[in-house]
Image: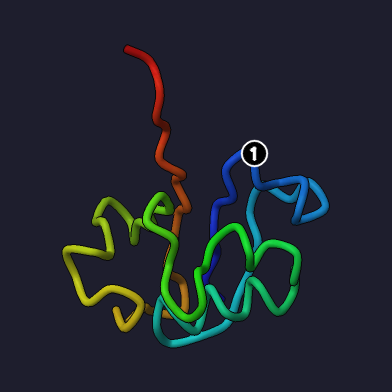
Amino acid sequence: MASIKIPTPLRAFTNNQAIVTVTGSTVGEALNNLTDQYPDLRQHLFNGAELRNFVNVFLDDEDIRFLSGLGTDIEADANLRIIPSIAGGR
């Protein structure tokens, strides 16, 4: 099964799980499975059916925005990472 590494700020919505095992054959299906398991997480990742602008998802070392986005195919043993953008400063 694929796994998704959850960043520290979002672990409050996954019962403090750092890595969650998911099912799905695409990134979108995997993220939907994640939010099915942890429904409170959905509002932090998605705006409707699209990822929020500040949410970056990586398949191994590749940003899915440079692949096929949520339609990116994944293998059963894929490693995904959610990386929220950080803004601020001067």
| Colour mapping | rainbow
Circle 1 packing at 10 Å, graded few (<14), some (14-19), many (20+), is few
Residue at (55% x, 52% y) in the render: 5
47 sits to left or right of 35: left
Residue at (28% x, 64% y) in the render: 64
Q: Residue furthest left?
A: 66
Q: Quadrant of residue 21?
A: bottom right
Give coordinates of residue 43: x percent, y percent. Answer: 63, 64
Please name the amino acid that badge 1 sits on. Pro
Q: Quadrant of residue 53?
A: bottom left
Q: Secondary structure at mark 1?
A: helix
Give coordinates of residue 66: x percent, y percent. Answer: 17, 63
Give coordinates of residue 55: x percent, y percent. Answer: 43, 53
Residue at (45% x, 53% y) in the render: 81
53 sits to left or right of 77: left
Give coordinates of residue 1: x percent, y percent. Answer: 56, 76
What is the total number of numbered labels drawn onto the structure image?
Answer: 1
Residue at (33% x, 56% y) in the render: 60
Q: Residue furthest front?
A: 90
53 sits to left or right of 35: left
Q: Quadrant of residue 90?
A: top left
Residue 87 against residue 74 in the figure, above or below = above
Pick the residue in front: 52 or 80: 52
Residue 58 against residue 90 in the figure, above or below = below
For label 1, the residue is: 9
Q: Residue furthest right?
A: 15
